[in-house]
Amino acid sequence: MSKIENYLHGTFCWSELCSHNWKEGKAFYTSLFNWGYDDQPIGENLYYTMLQKQGDDIAAMYEMDQEQVTAGVPSYWLAYITVDNVDECALKAKSLGAEIIAGPHDVMDAGRILMIKDPGGATVALWQGSAHKGCKRVEELNTPYWYEMATRDTKVSKDFYCSLLGWQSETKPMDNMQYTLFLVNGKPIAGMLEMTKEWPADIPAHWMIYFAVENCDTAIKKAVELGGQVCVPATDVPDVGRFCVICDPQGAVFSVIQPDMLSSSLA
C-alpha cells in the first residue's frame, strides 16, 4: 500500500468520470472495482461522487448535464495533471497552440482547475490542488495505474507536453510500434502511442486511463456481466502486463491492466 498526500508538478493526480447516467455508472464501477463512495451534493438531485478504496478518495464521477447529452457528447473519463501554477500554465498552453475549454477557476477550496484541448486534439485537466490534492492511493490494485496518450501526431503532442510541463521523453520499440515514455525526475509517469491508419477515423486523440487489477480476464468477465463491452481484447505486453480496453454501459472508455510489476499482495 502506498498512500500519497501531495503530487509533483507534471504528475497525474486524479481521474474523473462524466457519465450520461450517474446512478447506473456508479453501480457499474463500484461493483467492478469493489469501490465505496461518498455522494457530495452539488445541486438539486446532482452529486459529485468520490469513489473510494477503504475510505480513501481515488477517483470521482458526476452526471453530464442534459445540454451536453443532447449535443451528442459521449460519457468520458478525464485525467488531471498536477501543476504548480494553473494560471501560468494557461498562458503557456495557449501560446503553445492549446485550446482553453474551461478555467482557470477555483473549485471551492479544493483547488484551481484548467481544462484544455491540446494541439493534437486530446482533452486534459491541469490541477493546482489546495484542500484536495488528488488520488490518495497509488500503485495499488483497483486504483488508476497508468495514463497513456493516443495521438495522430506524436511529435506535436510530445513537443507540447514537454514544453508545457517540463516532461522528459524517451522512445523505444514495443510490440511492433514506437512507444514514448514521459518522465518526471527520471520516473515514467505516462506513455504515448501513435494512432495509425488502422484506427477508426472518428476516434479522436485522447488520454486513456488504466486501472490496475489482480486478474485481467476476471475483470473483463465481470465488466461484461455488468453490461460493459470489450473494445480491445485481453492482450499481453512483454515486461508490462496484460490489458484490455472496455466501454462501460454509458459509453465511457477505460482500460484495465494486470501489471507484471504490481504484486497482488497490495490489494
Image (cartoon, grey):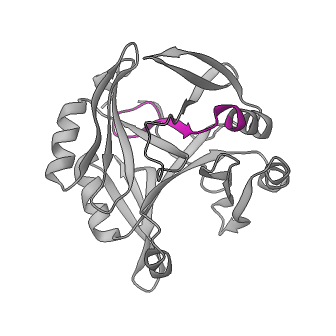
Q: Quadrant of residue 212?
A: top left
Q: Nearer the viewer, residue 63 or 180?
A: 180
The relative height of residue 26 versus residue 149 in the rendered view (above or below) is below
Residue appearing at x 17%, y 45% in the figure: 222
Q: Nearer the viewer, residue 141 or 242?
A: 242
The relative height of residue 104 versus residue 226 in the rendered view (above or below) is below
Query: Within the magenta stretch, is there residue 145?
Result: yes
Residue at the outermost front position: 197
Residue at the outermost bottom position: 44
Chain part drawn in magenta = 138-157
Q: Nearer the viewer, residue 92 or 179?
A: 179
**Which quarter shows the N terminus?**
top left
Residue 239 in the image, given as x and y percentages of width and height: 40, 13
Residue 163 seen in this snapshot:
yes
Residue appearing at x 68%, y 38% in the figure: 157
Residue 40 in the image, given as x and y percentages of width and height: 44, 70
Residue 76 in the image, given as x and y percentages of width and height: 45, 58
Q: Nearer the viewer, residue 173 or 130?
A: 173
Residue appearing at x 84%, y 49% in the figure: 92
Residue 56 in the image, given as x and y percentages of width and height: 42, 48
The relative height of residue 71 versus residue 92 in the rendered view (above or below) is below
**Which quarter shows the C terminus?**
top left
**Lateral position of residue 117 relative to residue 14, left or right:** right
Query: Within the magenta stretch, is there residue 9?
Result: no
